[in-house]
Amino acid sequence: PASRTNNTNTNLHQPKRNPPLLDLYPPLTFAYNVQTMSRPTSTNILDRNLGRSGGRSGDVSLSAFAYIYSELVQYHQGRAASISELERRLESAGYGVGLKVLEMTAYRAKETKRETRLMSILHFVSSSVWKSLFGKAADSLERSIDHTDEFMIIDYEPIASTFVSVPQDLGSLSADAYVSGIIAGVLDGAGFSARVTAHSVKVEEGEYTKQGGNTMTGMLPRKDKAVFLVKFSPEVLSRDAALER
Amino acid sequence: MSAPVLFVIVGKNEPLFEAEIDTQSSAAGQNDLSTRQNYFVLHSALDLVEKSAWTTNNMYLRVVDKVNHQQVSTFLTAANVKFMLLHGGKGEEVVKNFFNEVYGYYVKLSMNPFYKYDTPITSKAFDARVRAAARAYLS
């Protein structure tokens, strides 16, 4: 008993078969073919441009960074048992970043040269690395008078601790431990192993020379500057002394 | 050159990447013995690389070792990752361009947040690109 509706899909058990694209949408098929040939969906990281122009396009808003960073600090704070452990966790979080920043900044500088001397790697950190991370060079680089293996990088506006207030019971913890981890990563990667610690030092009267307040965040000038103390290991110093001759 | 080139990336403790690239399109099965010998020659040149690493601040260290008719050229990245190439006497410029291209790929690879520095490179895409670069520059 053939019914008049033989051709239509009245059988509910059979899945509805869609007609092939070719039949229904000829103009779109052509576009569809072109789309599959150029494969826009997957771009391998190795094909992407690194943006050698100097990183203007890579600017991130300070508030976005501060927000993510506060989450990072809270995460570690919940898992650390002591102040020094928290500091160590933040430093190791920054260490990996430092290694990558070293490669990236050196590559972007376009000249295939590495730093082999102590002073030149310190200059590299305080100017090139600082510029690529924070948009400006570090405010000063000093050598300690008491210890020949200690150097200080000073930043008057450290962005990691801009929106952080450290409670009394956490004492000397500096939120810039992340940045000191970054510096340690850069130095270690380049072959100058060092211990880097962040300290918050009160700014002296008249020391802060920026006019018109804090141009970056629009807030009043900070009372504390961040001092990153870099202490090199002995073999680095002896190697550098040997190269001097 | 009929001899294949051996390209190795060496980190602080161990090789991170190895590729034996036959620049001739017809790849006859490489003799196992000479492969092992090549690795040996290349790794024994590491001492010389260490020695000359601190004397210059160029990344490209040119030829650091010559054994029989083969030469080892080295390129050192900012983070002291060594790219070493064992070859049968390619020109300096040619090798330098190859190293620069691989350097670009290496930096891009290290931007991957899941790639830990100084660990073996397992990315097939990286391997494919290094081989393509070798074929482009070194044949």
Image (cartoon, helix red, strand yellow):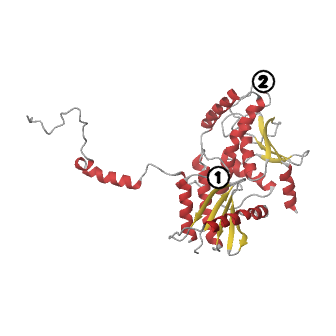
Q: Quick check: B5 above or below A194? A: below
What's the amino acid at mark 1? Met
Q: Nearer the viewer, residue A38 or A64?
A: A38
Within 10 angstroms of label 1, few (less than 14), some, or many (20 or more) residues? many
- Determine whether, in the image, residue A55 is placed left or right of residue A140: left
* Chain that bears disc 2: A
Q: Residue furthest right?
A: A146
* Residue A89 place in picture, x, y as percent: 71, 35
Residue closer to the observer: A202 or A32:
A32
Residue matched to label 2: A169
Where is residue B115? Give x, y as percent: 61, 47
Residue found 66% across the figure and 40% down from its top: A216
Q: Is there any visible trace of residue A212 in the rendered image?
A: no
Element assignment for label 1: helix
Label whose residue precedes the other's in the sequence (1 or 2): 1
Question: Which residue does the image show at 24% across and 40% down from the upper left?
Answer: A17
Q: What SS does tag 2 mark?
A: helix
The residue singled out by tag 1 in the image is A104
Vertically, is A233 above or below B95?
above
User: Residue B74 in the image: x percent, y percent?
Assistant: 69, 65
Q: Is residue A30 left or right of residue B11?
A: left
- Displayed quadrant of residue A176: top right
Q: Dot 2 surroundings within 10 Å: few (below 14), some, or many (20 or more)?
A: few
